[in-house]
Structure formats: structure tokens, C-alpha cells
Image (cartoon, helix red, strand yellow):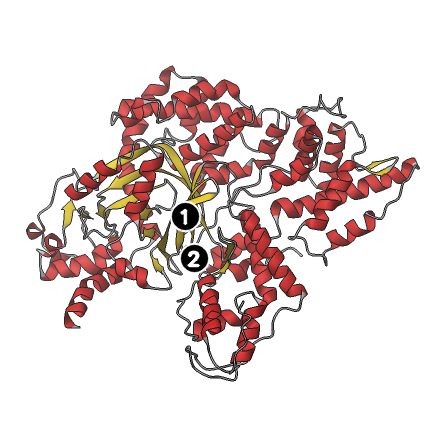
């Protein structure tokens, strides 16, 4: 026992030490590391653009020659998003003139990305700037936007987020994509394909958008013909009838029921009347289908007020009800609009099945709330057992049909049901019914249904892209999944940020894997932990494999801790930089996975593996700790030729810091799903660890 305590003491000390630090401190370290690089780049950019276009010169002057697209390590978060946006537009046949330049600036095809030369970095930086300016200028051409490419870039730098800037021109982006619509092979052969009209599909209120839609269709009726409802109306009404996300108590459903009774009409005025009624209903329903019911503006205000360190980045949806209808006319079916409106999350269809299941449970009356009862173990007897069995039957966990001699006995069929219920709720699945299980049993069917709908709405605002490989980290589940299409090829437990240091919800791209990373130690840990220890023992940092440098580079000069009078420091800390060298003792473990972002959040190994034994793993300062980091490395080696797993294992044994650049970046989303259906259709629920469920439920548009 004593030996175990001795083993735990240094681990607990390190955990206590890490609790001082926050995501913002790691941001400060990153900014400090980049400051010297930026200073050098500014001077070189100023010289290099002398031979470039007037537009490029204007852009860099406006941002004081600051590098945007390249940092000291590799591509920045801005570059990753820009590349992704361009690829999506290329796939739609847009901006084809930029494809050649885009291909030249791909890391897998340009050896300058492997160079440490400042000249090469400047050339890449300016090349990507030219790509950005051309692309955004094309999007905004002929639009009455409050931004141009340069002012939009200034906004992005101010917000430290290109996503925020791109969201600012969502209407223009939808209009830009809508201009490619061509209905020459449809019944609407005289389609008015005017850019000035197309932008109104997203600009203004419903009436303005509706008018723009009909103008593009030369004011031909869509929903009504002389025989009654058109094929589009029939497809539309069938969609409403079969949509499990739409409540039958909603005004949308009531309006559909009234309009669906229409018989054949011939009067011109009546046709127009019903045409516009159905058109408005379409707008209303498609807004629900596309956007859901969360009031994101109100939630973001509440988030800043109640969770100042929290962040939830949404990606504006690049479609509108009206633009999707125009596309559907070309496709000759409204099913096109419904398909385009659906999120691309691999488990979305299973979540809809879960919604159907719980809607049926609610329609059947839900379940009776259990009275208070004491803790229960298998083979115990209690008068609550019959009610507990009924409760678990209602949710589908108790499936046994065998009769029991003693209805008050906690027997094997009930144990099987309780274990299944506990697994679905992320609880310790051993059959012991304590406080946590009782709390989960206490949640009503109606509230569970509302949570399923809420999580479906959240997925509507996740970035929509159809990549082969995708990483999802579900924060409330403390799980990470690597998908190959619709299939999970790797999954593992993770540790995420605790309340007050919440892991942000955002999208990124894994571009670099670092073997044997250094841990750059934040100032709060230096102040509270290292300085007091050094005052007592100048050899303390050496004993913990912590190096003291004059700069954050591991190649900067080392400082001998015995040469410093540490007693003159306290609240004030020295200008030296403290870094823990690579090794199994390192706080980041042996490997980390980088996806450039404004929060300095990444995935990494850990030397505190005992923490994965905990049920509740919101324990970090915001970064994501992986239970099986080497298994993930092996998975990467099967999907990226630049990752050699056998060679990587040899490097890991040598403790030499080694970055691996991926041939193609892998998308990653940190998600906040408290309810979902797994690959086998099992409906899962998790605790609302940050309180976001209740915050968003209170904002729902009724």
C-alpha cells in the first residue's frame, strides 16, 4: 500500500501542477514563439512584394505586412480553411482558373513546404495570399457586400478566425454558388440566371427571397397546376409527413394538413393564392430542416457570460430554402433539396431512428417516475424491483420474457437490463444501482426526446464536407472516433477540459504529428511550482528533465539553474523559458497531433494513464489526452504514406523530437453530443458536463 502511495505522489503533484495552467496560457506561449518569426517575415514580405501586383501590395500594407498563411512550423489555421473552401468550390465547378495555382501550393506537391528557408516561406505566403484575394474577389464581385477581400482579411485577423470572417459573407457565398444554376434542360428553360437576382435568394426577409426565387423561375407556378398539387407539392408534403424531427403539434404541420386537402382548382386567382401559401410553408419548413431551432446568437451571448473560456464555432450553412428549390428544379425532384439539407455526420440516420423510437415512447405515455429507493446490488430484494423492471422495459433495456418466482428479487434478467442501461449512459456497467444510475433513471422520456432533437440540430451547424477520413472527438462521451467513410476504424477514450477550462467545439485539420514533443511550461506553473522548488533545490529542474533556455526553441542556449539566484523571484518570474525534454516522463507523453487553431488545443499522449480509470474524464486544461495514441499513429500509417509506423517506433525509442508532415490533412471536429446512436443502433446518453444542453434548450425557437 505504501509503495502505491509513493508511486502516486509524483503523479498527483503533476496533476495538481497542470491544474494551474489554462488554454489561454498556451496561446500566449504560441504567440511568443511566433513573434520573432513574424518580425523576420514582415521585413522579407515588404521586400518581396515590390514585384507583385498592386492588389497584393494593398493587402499586405493593410495588415502591416503580417504573415497570415505560413507560420514558423507549417501552414496556419487560415490556410487549412482556405484550401478546404477552394476545394469545395472546385468540386462545384467554380473558380476553375485558380486550380493550377491551388495545385502548385499543395504541401504534397511543393517541396518548399519542407524548407526552413525564410525566402521559401515568404514565396509560399505570398502565393497563398494571391489565391485568397482572387477567390474572395470572385465571390464578392457584383455583390453589395460591406466587405472586400482585404477588409474581410482584417476582420479574420481581428477575430483570430477565418471561419468567423467567412461566415460574415455567407449570403454572398450562397449567391456565388447559385449563379452556376442552369435549368436549360428542365421545364423552366427560360430561367433568369441573373447574379443580381440570385443574391436576393439570401438577402432580406422571406418576402424578398420569395420574390427573387420566382423571378429566377420567370414567375411560373411550382406547387399548383390545373390538376391540383404538382409533383413538387406531393414530394414536399410526403417529406413533412415522414419527418420525425417535426412535431405534429407545430404550426408547420398544421398548415400542411390544411393545404393538403386541396382539390382541383381552375380559377387563376385561387391558383396564385394556394401557390404562395405552399411557397411560404416551404420556406418555413426548410428553415427548420436546414437550420434547426437553436438560437445561436443568444447562445453565444450566454456562453460568453457563463463560460468565458468556452467556445463553440458554428459553420454557416451555404444554402437557403430558396437556393435549394432552384437547384431542385434543375434536378426535377425536391428530394435534391432534402438530401442537401441533411448533415453529413456518419451516424445521423441512426440518430433519426433513435428519435423515432423515443417519439413512440413519448406517444405511448413515457414511463412512470420511480419513487426514491436505496442502493441496490444483484441478489438483493426490494419492493422497488417490479417498478424498476417496468421502467427498463419501457426504454427497451429489459427484454427477458421469463417469469420470476420472486418479483422483489434483483435477479439475472434485471442485472442484464441494468448493465445495458448503464452502458448506454456511460456509467460503470457492473449492475450496482447507486446515485448516478438513479439520476439517469429519473430523466423523463420527454426530456430525452428533447435532447435527441437538440443534438440533431447541433449537427446541422457542423462543417459539411465529404472527406474519406474524419476524426470526431465527442466531449461529453470522453471518446474519439476515426471514421473511414461510414465506418469507425479506430476509437478510444479521451480526457477533455474540465468546467472552467472547457475544450472548445470547433473544426480543424490534422496536418502534423510530433514524435517526442517538448512540453513548453506555462508561466503559472513556473510561478507556483517551479520557482518555489528551485529556491529550495536548484537541481530540481534537472531531476525532472526540465531544461531552462533563453528562448522557446529547443536549440536556443541552455541556462544552468545553479547559476541563477532564484530567491529574487516570486510573483515576478525570469525571462527564461522552461521546457520538459522528450521522454515517457513528459507531460505530453510521447506523441502529439497538431491541428492549427486559435485555441492552441491539440491531441496528445499523457504520462498520467491512471486517469483513464475514471468514469468522469473532464480533467484537462482544454487539450485532448488520448488513451491509445500509438494505436492512432498506426492507423495514420495505413492512410498516409508519409507515416511509417515501424520507423516511428524506432524514433520514439530515441527521444528525438521529430515532426511528421501528412500528405493530406485529416478533418477533425470536436463535438458536444449528449445523445446519439452508435453504429449498432444503440441509443446513448451522457451527462451535460458543461451545462450546454440546458443553455441551448432555453433558446429554442418555438
Above or below, comparing residue 161 to residue 65 in the picture: below
In the image, 357 versus 454, the foreground residue is 357
Q: Please identify the quarter of the rendering in which residue 178 is found.
A: top right
In the picture, measured across the screen, residue 346 lies left or right of residue 561, that is right
Residue neighbourhood size for the residue with mark 1, other residues' Cα within 10 Å, grouped as few (<14), some (14–19), many (≥20)? some
Q: Residue furthest top?
A: 51
Q: Which mark is residue 481?
A: 1
Above or below, comparing residue 179 to residue 589 in the picture: above
In the picture, measured across the screen, residue 537 lies left or right of residue 283, that is left
Residues at badges 2 and 1 in contact (C-beta under 8 Å)? no
- Disc 2 designates what residue? 477
Q: Please identify the quarter of the rendering in which residue 263 is found.
A: top right
Q: How many marks?
A: 2
User: Can you give x and y, in whole percent of width and height, for residue 607 in the image?
Assistant: 23, 55
Residue drawn at point x = 67 percent, y = 23 percent = 182
In the picture, measured across the screen, residue 523 lies left or right of residue 158, that is left
Amino acid at each position: 500500500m505504501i509503495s502505491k502511495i509513493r508511486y502516486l505522489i509524483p503523479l498527483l503533484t503533476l496533476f495538481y501542477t497542470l491544474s494551474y495552467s489554462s488554454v489561454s496560457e498556451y496561446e500566449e506561449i504560441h504567440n511568443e514563439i511566433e513573434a520573432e518569426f513574424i518580425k523576420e517575415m514582415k521585413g522579407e514580405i515588404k521586400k518581396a512584394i515590390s514585384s507583385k501586383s498592386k492588389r497584393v501590395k494593398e493587402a499586405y500594407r493593410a495588415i502591416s505586412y503580417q504573415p497570415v498563411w505560413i507560420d514558423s512550423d507549417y501552414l496556419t489555421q487560415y490556410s487549412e480553411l482556405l484550401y478546404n473552401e477552394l476545394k469545395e468550390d472546385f468540386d462545384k465547378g467554380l473558380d476553375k482558373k485558380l486550380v493550377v495555382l491551388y495545385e502548385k501550393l499543395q504541401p504534397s506537391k511543393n517541396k518548399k513546404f519542407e524548407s526552413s528557408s525564410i525566402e521559401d516561406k515568404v514565396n509560399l505566403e505570398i502565393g497563398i495570399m494571391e489565391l485568397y484575394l482572387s477567390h474572395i474577389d470572385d465571390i464578392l464581385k457584383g455583390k453589395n457586400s460591406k466587405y472586400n477581400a482585404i477588409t474581410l482579411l482584417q476582420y479574420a485577423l481581428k477575430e483570430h478566425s477565418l471561419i468567423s470572417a467567412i461566415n460574415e459573407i455567407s449570403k454572398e457565398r450562397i449567391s456565388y454558388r447559385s449563379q452556376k444554376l442552369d435549368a436549360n434542360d428542365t421545364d423552366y428553360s427560360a430561367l433568369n440566371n441573373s447574379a443580381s437576382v440570385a443574391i436576393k435568394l439570401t438577402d432580406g426577409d422571406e418576402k424578398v427571397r420569395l420574390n427573387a426565387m420566382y423571378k429566377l423561375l420567370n414567375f411560373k407556378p411550382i406547387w399548383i397546376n390545373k390538376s391540383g398539387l404538382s409533383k413538387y407539392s406531393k414530394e414536399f408534403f410526403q417529406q413533412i409527413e415522414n419527418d420525425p424531427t417535426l412535431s405534429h403539434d407545430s404550426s408547420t404541420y398544421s398548415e400542411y394538413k390544411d393545404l393538403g386537402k386541396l382539390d382541383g382548382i381552375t380559377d387563376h386567382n385561387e391558383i396564385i393564392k394556394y401557390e404562395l401559401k405552399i411557397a411560404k410553408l416551404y420556406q418555413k419548413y426548410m428553415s427548420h430542416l436546414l437550420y434547426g431551432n437553436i438560437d445561436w446568437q443568444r447562445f453565444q451571448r450566454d456562453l460568453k457570460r457563463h463560460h468565458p473560456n468556452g467556445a463553440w464555432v458554428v459553420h454557416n450553412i451555404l444554402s437557403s430554402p430558396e437556393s435549394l428549390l432552384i437547384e431542385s428544379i434543375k434536378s426535377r425532384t425536391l428530394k435534391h433539396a432534402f438530401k442537401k439539407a441533411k448533415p453529413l455526420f456518419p451516424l445521423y440516420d441512426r440518430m433519426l431512428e433513435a428519435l423515432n423510437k423515443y417519439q413512440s415512447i413519448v406517444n405511448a405515455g413515457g414511463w412512470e417516475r420511480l419513487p426514491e429507493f436505496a442502493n441496490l446490488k444483484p441478489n438483493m430484494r426490494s419492493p422497488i424491483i417490479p417498478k424498476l423492471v417496468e421502467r427498463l422495459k419501457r426504454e427497451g433495456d429489459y427484454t427477458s420474457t421469463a417469469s420470476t418466482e420472486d418479483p422483489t428479487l434483483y435477479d439475472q434478467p434485471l442485472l442484464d437490463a441494468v448493465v445495458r442501461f448503464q452502458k448506454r449512459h456511460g456509467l460503470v456497467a457492473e449492475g450496482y444501482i447507486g446515485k448516478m444510475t438513479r439520476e439517469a433513471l429519473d430523466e423523463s422520456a420527454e426530456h430525452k426526446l428533447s435532447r435527441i432533437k437538440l443534438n440533431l440540430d447541433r449537427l446541422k451547424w457542423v462543417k459539411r464536407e465529404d472527406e474519406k477520413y474524419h476524426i470526431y472527438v465527442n466531449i461529453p462521451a470522453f471518446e474519439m472516433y476515426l471514421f473511414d467513410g461510414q465506418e469507425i476504424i479506430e476509437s478510444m477514450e479521451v480526457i477533455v477540459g474540465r468546467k472552467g477550462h472547457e475544450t472548445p467545439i470547433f473544426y480543424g485539420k490534422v496536418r502534423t504529428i510530433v514524435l517526442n514533443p517538448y512540453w513548453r511550461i506555462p508561466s503559472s506553473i513556473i510561478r507556483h511550482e517551479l520557482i518555489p522548488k528551485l529556491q529550495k533545490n536548484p537541481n530540481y529542474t534537472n531531476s525532472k528533465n526540465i531544461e531552462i533556455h533563453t528562448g522557446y526553441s529547443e536549440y536556443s542556449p541552455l541556462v544552468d539553474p545553479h547559476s541563477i539566484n532564484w530567491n529574487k523571484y516570486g510573483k515576478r518570474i525570469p525571462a527564461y523559458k522552461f521546457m520538459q525534454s522528450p521522454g515517457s516522463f513528459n507531460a505530453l507523453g510521447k506523441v502529439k497531433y497538431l491541428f492549427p487553431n486559435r485555441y492552441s488545443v491539440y491531441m496528445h499522449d499523457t504520462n498520467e494513464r491512471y486517469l483513464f480509470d475514471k468514469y468522469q474524464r473532464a480533467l484537462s486544461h482544454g487539450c485532448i489526452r488520448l488513451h491509445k495514441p500509438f494505436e492512432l499513429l498506426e492507423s495514420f500509417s495505413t492512410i498516409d504514406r508519409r507515416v511509417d509506423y515501424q520507423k516511428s517506433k524506432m524514433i520514439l525509442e530515441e527521444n528525438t523530437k521529430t515532426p511528421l508532415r501528412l500528405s493530406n490533412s485529416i478533418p477533425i471536429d470536436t463535438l458536444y453530443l449528449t445523445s446519439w446512436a452508435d453504429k449498432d443502433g444503440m441509443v446513448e446518453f451522457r451527462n451535460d458536463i458543461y451545462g450546454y444542453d440546458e443553455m441551448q434548450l432555453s433558446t429554442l425557437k418555438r
